[in-house]
Image (cartoon, grey):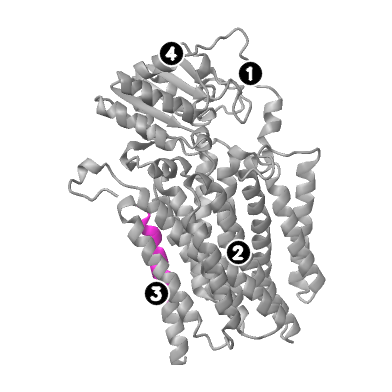
């Protein structure tokens, strides 16, 4: 069932390159949102947790999977919300965009 | 491939693309919010796709887990104040790594007790998953405890610490190696998890509060690698992609942070900065005097300045004075002056800490200027206002080779026409290093709590 091919290694390395190129261009201004964003994205381990929790393989897997679903969901929900909250705060000088609604 | 599998894979591809686009949107502040909302959509798609998985037979535990997780996660997203952001990030690394570790253990257990032998490649993936995962769980929890001040933030060191840590790593890696040869050795597997947990604790114990930006970045990277390893173990590409992105991001941030402190990775992890300082820095304060300034005089200088550069540090976050700074800046600007903020990469306790704080106080982000850009502007500044920053403005980093921070890139505050330093007391910074800026003849000190002093400055400037 678990076939470990070289395809996965290709995917990992290529994704690593994409990540490296994209993230080196993120300005220091947004480094904190970047951290919370990558954190929220890595809550994708939820995908693995869901299968472990729901596949009825054995009790250990179900319980560990259940706890994993909880903690990954905390990150997915909390992570995206807090990233959005932070990004909402970053704005330019108000005078430069006249007519914009003041929050 | 059945239509159902096709749908699942399509969901994963969509999620991967949205994640990458989301991160790319973070290269510009204008596009960032939109992009991250798309990434969140990607997460929803991936989860929905997974729920179609043919191995999933019951939804009771899943639903309960999703609900409980959302109930805990929502307040963590909505109510945590910006000043608590470093510990918030640290605790989220704990959750992320915990999920990866538990999935790894469940996967191992299921294989072993389901009669399927654990192959060596699978063991390698599971090993990386649980070692990185467990290390991150305990290490990030330690970082969280230090930032939340549940335990002292200063470095905790003891004799033979590095030797003990290296020995512990060696045993952990040794048991990993043994497992690769004998994947069925269940006890060794759990021992390895335990050792990795212990390593995380001991790794962060000797690291001081001011080095936290590096630790948090590193933990970010490890959490990502643990996720990627999960992807290898269960043959899931979206996990590998998301994990690789996270790992790359944490890695880049760690390098940026280490560079900004002019220290190598290894030095941060094993250096225990405090012990270096115990050797003594070159300069002492003997025979030097500092000039104190009254709030009235400081207000006068600020009110009539044409150009002011504010240099915020961790002290600003501690005093929660970001809104008061903004108020003061507004007053100065109303009188025709110009106010900018000089942001050192390691000011605060995590990458970008000061930017988030000031953005919260409605400071427009084009006023937040990075070190390399602002440094040439200091000579033209009438007043540099240093709030709760110390080592990042210490000229010893430029001109005193015997100083432990020599070579660290700093903000050239001493080149401004006048410098006002707001500080609680004359206690030196975290490193215990004397700061010659305080004895500079251009510098005057305004002692007291940053927020109170700023509040008094605001009311003084108003009367002028």
Q: Earlier in the sequence, mark 4 or mark 3?
A: 3
Q: Earlier in the sequence, mark 4 or mark 1?
A: 1
Provide the secondary structure element on which disc 3 rests.
helix
Report how far apart the C-alphas of labels 4 and 3 lie in the structure.
Answer: 58 Å
Residue B229 image point, x, y percent: 60, 68
Q: Circles 3 and 2: CB distance less than 8 Å?
A: no
Give me the C-alpha separation between circle 4 and circle 1: 22 Å
The residue depicted at 67 percent of the width and 85 percent of the height is A57
Q: Are marks 1 and 3 in contact (CB under 8 Å)?
A: no
Reading the chain from its start, which is encountered first: label 2 or label 4? 2
CA distance for labels 3 and 2: 22 Å
Q: Position of residue B373 (x, y in %)?
A: 36, 34
For the record, the magenta segment spans B13-27
- Same-subunit check for callouts 1 and 3: yes
- Which secondary structure, mark 2? helix
Asked where in the image residue A56 lies, by quadrant, the reply is: bottom right
Counting from the top left corner in percent of width and height, residue A41 is at 48, 64
**Dot placed on the residue nearer the N-terminal end, 1 or 3:** 3
Q: CA distance from mark 2 to mark 4?
A: 51 Å
| Distance between the alpha carbons at the discs numbered 2 and 1 | 44 Å
Q: Is residue B229 above or below residue B326?
A: below
Give the farthest residue toward the left.
A99
Task: Identify the residue position indicated by label 1 in the image.
Answer: B282
| Chain at tag 1 | B
Label 2: chain?
A: B
Q: Nearer the viewer, mark 4 or mark 3?
A: 4
Residue located beneath label 3 in the image? B14
Residue on which disc 4 sits: B442
* Residue that carries the numbered disc 2 in the rendered image: B226
Q: Of tags 2 and 4, which is closer to the observer?
A: 4
The kind of secondary structure element at disc 1 is loop
The answer to whether any part of residue A13 appears in the image is no
């Amino acid at each position: 069932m678990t076939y470990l091919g070289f395809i996965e290694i290709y995917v990992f390395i290529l994704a690593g390159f994409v990540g490296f190129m994209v993230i080196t261009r993120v300005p220091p201004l947004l480094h904190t949102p970047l951290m919370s964003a990558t954190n929220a994205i890595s809550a994708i381990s939820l995908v693995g947790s869901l299968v472990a929790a729901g596949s009825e393989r054995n009790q250990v897997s179900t319980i560990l999977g259940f706890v994993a679903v909880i903690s990954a969901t905390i990150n997915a929900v909390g992570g995206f919300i807090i990233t959005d909250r932070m990004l909402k705060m970053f704005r330019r000088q108000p005078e430069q965009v006249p007519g914009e609604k003041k929050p | 491939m059945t239509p159902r599998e096709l749908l699942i894979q399509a969901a994963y591809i969509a999620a991967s693309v949205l994640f990458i686009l989301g991160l790319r949107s973070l290269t510009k502040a204008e596009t960032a919010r939109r992009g991250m909302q798309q990434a969140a959509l990607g997460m929803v798609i991936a989860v929905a796709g997974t729920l179609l998985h043919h191995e999933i037979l019951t939804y009771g535990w899943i639903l309960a887990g999703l609900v409980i997780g959302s109930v805990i996660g929502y307040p963590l997203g909505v109510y945590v104040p910006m000043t608590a952001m470093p510990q918030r990030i640290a605790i989220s690394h704990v959750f992320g790594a915990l999920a990866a570790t538990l999935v790894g253990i469940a996967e191992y257990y299921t294989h072993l007790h389901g009669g399927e032998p654990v192959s060596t490649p699978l063991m390698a993936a599971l090993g990386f998953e649980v070692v990185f995962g467990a290390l991150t769980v305990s290490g990030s929890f330690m970082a969280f405890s230090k930032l939340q001040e549940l335990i002292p933030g200063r470095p905790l060191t003891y004799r033979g610490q590095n030797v003990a840590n290296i020995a512990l790593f060696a045993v952990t890696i040794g048991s990993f190696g043994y497992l690769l040869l004998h994947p069925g050795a269940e006890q060794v597997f759990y021992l390895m998890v335990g050792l990795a947990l212990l390593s995380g604790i001991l790794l962060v114990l000797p690291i001081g509060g001011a080095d936290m930006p590096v630790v948090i970045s590193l933990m970010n990277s490890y959490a990502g690698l643990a996720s990627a390893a999960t992807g290898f173990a269960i043959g899931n590409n979206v996990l590998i992609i998301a994990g690789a992105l996270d790992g790359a991001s944490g890695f880049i941030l760690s390098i940026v942070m280490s560079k900004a402190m002019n220290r190598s990775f290894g030095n941060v992890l094993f250096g225990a900065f405090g012990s270096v300082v115990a050797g003594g820095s070159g300069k002492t304060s003997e025979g030097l005097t500092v000039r104190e300034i009254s709030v009235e005089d400081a207000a006068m200088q600020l009110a009539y300045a044409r150009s002011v550069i504010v240099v915020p540090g961790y002290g600003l976050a501690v005093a929660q004075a970001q809104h008061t700074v903004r108020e003061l800046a507004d007053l100065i600007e109303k009188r025709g002056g110009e106010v900018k903020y000089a942001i050192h990469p390691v000011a605060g306790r995590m990458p970008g800490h000061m930017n988030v704080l000031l953005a919260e106080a409605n400071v427009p982000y084009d006023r937040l200027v990075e070190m390399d850009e602002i440094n040439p502007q200091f000579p033209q500044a009438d007043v540099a206002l240093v709030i709760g920053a110390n080592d990042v403005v210490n000229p010893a980093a430029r001109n005193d080779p015997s100083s432990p921070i020599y070579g660290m890139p700093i903000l050239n505050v001493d080149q401004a026409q006048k410098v006002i330093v707001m500080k609680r007391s004359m206690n030196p910074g975290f490193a215990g290093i004397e700061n010659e800026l305080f004895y500079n003849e251009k510098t005057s000190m305004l002692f007291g709590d940053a927020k109170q002093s700023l509040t008094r400055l605001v009311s003084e400037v108003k009367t002028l």
